[in-house]
Image (tube, rainbow, N blue to C red):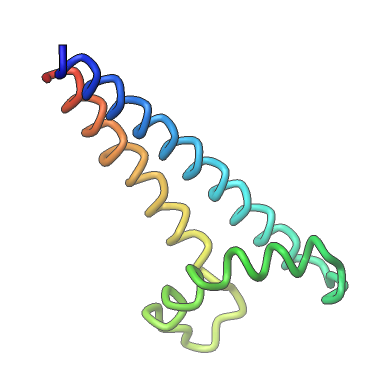
Amino acid sequence: MFSIGASNFIIALAKIMDIILTLYMWIIIARALISWVNPDPYNSIVIFLHRVTEPVLAPVRRMIPRHNLPIDFAPLVVLLIIIFLQSFLVQTMIQMARSL
């Protein structure tokens, strides 16, 4: 009986993690799209997107050499990491829960 409860709990955590990762992926995409135009830096949506994404994007930017390119590849790298986490971590949690 305990393993059924633990299994359901792990599956629920995996689904919540998947939803959070998907939501963050869309926030990253919105930030990237907004950066293509000249957004008002005092707009509350722009401020929100910057505050939510910059703590993740800044360390990635420091690791990627820019070589004076006008394109910021950090959002793409973060999106690939999110897809990896969804494909590997979430699916591994679900498979682990089903094997309990």
In the picture as drawn, the residue positioned furthest to the front comes out as: 1
In the picture provided, is 46 more to the left or to the right than 61? right
Please report the residue visible at 12 percent of the width from the left and 19 percent of the height from the top. Answer: 99
Location of residue 13 with respect to 6 vertically, above or below: below
Please report the residue visible at 43 percent of the width from the left and 77 percent of the height from the top. Answer: 59
Spot occupied by residue 82 in the image (x, y as percentages of width and height): 41, 49
Spot occupied by residue 79 in the image (x, y as percentages of width and height): 47, 53
Please report the residue visible at 16 percent of the width from the left and 27 percent of the height from the top. Answer: 96
In the picture provided, is 28 more to the left or to the right than 18? right
In the picture as drawn, the residue positioned furthest to the left comes out as: 100
Residue toward you, 24 or 78: 24
Spot occupied by residue 11 in the image (x, y as percentages of width and height): 31, 25
Q: Quadrant of the C terminus?
A: top left
Q: Quadrant of residue 1?
A: top left
Residue toward you, 56 or 11: 11
Spot occupied by residue 9 in the image (x, y as percentages of width and height): 30, 26
Q: In which quarter of the image is residue 63?
A: bottom left
Q: In which quarter of the image is residue 93?
A: top left
Please report the residue visible at 42 percent of the width from the left and 83 percent of the height from the top. Answer: 62
In the picture as drawn, the residue positioned furthest to the bottom comes out as: 68
